Amino acid sequence: MADVTLLTTHDPRVIARFAGTTAWTIVGSPRTLTIDVDQAELDAAVSEYEANGFSLAYIQGASKHEIDSIAERVRQKYITVGDGQAMVYVDKGNEAADYKAAGYPAGSGSPPTLTNYPFIQAEVDATGKTNQVATDDILTERSNWVAKASSIEKERLGGKKAVDDAADVLAASDAREAAITALKAL
């Protein structure tokens, strides 16, 4: 007999199905189903588990959804959340790149304003920075974000591929757990 972790899950249907049975122990958060059985009993339990609607395909789908959710939570550690704010970040970064490519042109009027670059002007007005410093700061922030976001995306996509490539429920669960651990480390 050996302790074997069959699945780590948040799914209340899985937890409810196996809670209170003699061969199953449910511990921790996320819930881990651990059994202390011999191989034949383990094989029978896995067959029963899969026969009750928790097939490899089901586990893969749920795992990929959870990987996506965790990736989004990790992204939110580094950015302000919101569709409108995301649009501002994109537009502001593009505008800063255009302004720099144009050679940091001086504004017009008295005092000079950057009519064609409203996000740069907003940054200057809010922070008191010069046009060039504000622009360079925006581009640095964008560069830092792209580096972090691409790391998150690499772990998210790699984790989902590993889940898809899993040959069985145990491998899918292991792939999910590895992806989530990697994402949370970012």
Image (spheres, rainbow, N blue to C red):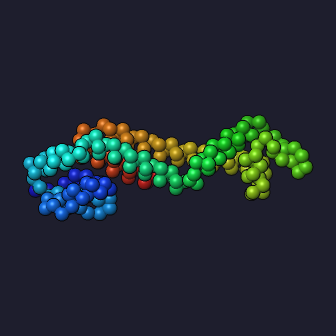
Q: Quadrant of residue 26?
A: bottom left
Q: Is residue 27 visible?
A: yes
Give residue 45's position: percent from left, percent from top. Answer: 14, 50
Quadrant occupied by the N terminus: bottom left
* Residue placed most toward the observer, 15 or 177: 15
Q: Is residue 65 left or right of residue 24?
A: right
Count of numbered labels shown in the rendering: 0
Q: Is residue 3 visible?
A: no
Q: Is residue 2 left or right of residue 141?
A: left
Q: Is residue 39 left or right of residue 57?
A: left
Q: Residue at x 47, y 43 (%)?
A: 153
Give residue 113's position: percent from left, percent from top. Answer: 83, 47
Q: Residue at x 78, y 38 (%)?
A: 103
Q: Residue at x 56, y 44 (%)?
A: 146
Q: Residue at x 38, y 49 (%)?
A: 66
Does residue 10 lie above or below 156 as drawn?
A: below
Does residue 74 lie above or below 150 as drawn?
A: below
* Residue placed most toward the observer, 65 or 145: 65
Does residue 20 lie above or below 11 as drawn?
A: below
* Residue placed most toward the observer, 17 or 173: 17
Give residue 122's position: percent from left, percent from top. Answer: 75, 51
Give residue 46's position: percent from left, percent from top. Answer: 17, 47
